[in-house]
Image: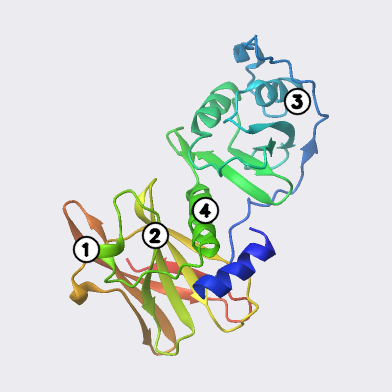
Amino acid sequence: MNKKLLTCMMLALALTACGKAEAPATTSTEETAEPEVTETAETTVDLEQFRTDFIGDNSNVVGIASNQKYPEGYSYDSVELQTTDYPYELKVFLKKDDSVKPLYNELDENANQAFDLIGNMDMLTYMLGDDYIVAQYTKDESGQVQPSPYNYSSVIDRIVEQYADENKEPLDWSSTAELKENADAIIKMAEDSTGRYKVYGVISKEEGTYGLILNDNLYSDDNNMNHAYVRWYHSEDPSITPSLEWKGETLYLNYQEPDGDSYKDVTAEVLCGFETGTMDLMFEE
């Protein structure tokens, strides 16, 4: 998210948030020459011809990445391979039209296809430019392709941007009457006793009540944003309102998460990076 947008966010939402995760660092990368893309509007390339057991097989890996069909408005640019150390990673750099929407799960099919065709690939990351992660995928122990929770950051960014553009403030916890079905919203969940730390819940068309925005308001020029990718439960009952509570020098977030047809209480320690403004959650067992 650019600095101009983040400045608007601080003015419109009073959200001084904390940082996004980056793709795991790799110790060695192998850049590949940009290939000629062979797919045209009239023809569809059979990707099976590029099947390979090894991510280091440059020509076949490039053939797969460059000939896949991408969501409307997005197209292939180049790739970068990490073949020296685990995790073996393929980075696919995309280009996009200015007017296209951010992606959430639209690259799932691409990822499943790429993992099927590249035998020893451990991680697949889609990028815009050198810094912005569009989506990221790994394989679990059973070999199933799993999207990273980080992918949901594009949804959170979209909703925050919408609030900034419309000069809207987050809704109070009890403002359920203002919520419409399948609407995007940001709900103010809790504030600590010092007024420095705040937590906001994200409601999206895609996932409902999923995702938290954690904020450290110590520095007015703090332009970071930190997301916690957890599900939470929203109720009109004031007796189950979330809270930020200090116990000694440790800050805890108490909230509820869905549990079948009901909900259950959850407590998580808020890990605060006092000099950096970063925040994270550590859940109690």
Q: Residue at x 30, y 59 (%)?
A: 179
| Above or below, comparing residue 257 to residue 152 in the picture | below
Label 1: which residue?
Answer: 264
Residue 241 position within the rendered picture, expressed as x and y whole percent measured from the top left:
26, 74
Going from the N terminus, do you reach mark 1 or mark 2 first? 2
Q: Secondary structure at mark 4?
A: helix
Q: Amino acid at mark 3?
A: Asn
Marks 4 & 3, CB-CB < 8 Å contact? no
Label 2: which residue?
Answer: 185
Q: Quadrant of residue 278?
A: bottom right
Q: Residue at x 66, y 16 (%)?
A: 50
Going from the N terminus, do you reach mark 4 or mark 3 first? 3
Going from the N terminus, do you reach mark 1 or mark 3 first? 3
Residue 164 left/right relative to 173: right
Q: Amino acid at mark 2?
A: Ala
Q: Amino acid at mark 1?
A: Lys
Q: Residues within 10 Å of mark 4 (few under 14, many from 20)?
A: some
Q: CA distance from mark 4 to mark 1?
A: 29 Å
Q: Secondary structure at mark 1?
A: strand
Marks 1 & 2, CB-CB < 8 Å contact? no
Q: Residues within 10 Å of mark 3 (few under 14, many from 20)?
A: some
Q: 38 or 54: nearer the eye? A: 38
Residue 61 position within the rendered picture, expressed as x and y whole percent measured from the top left:
69, 25
Q: Secondary structure at mark 2?
A: strand
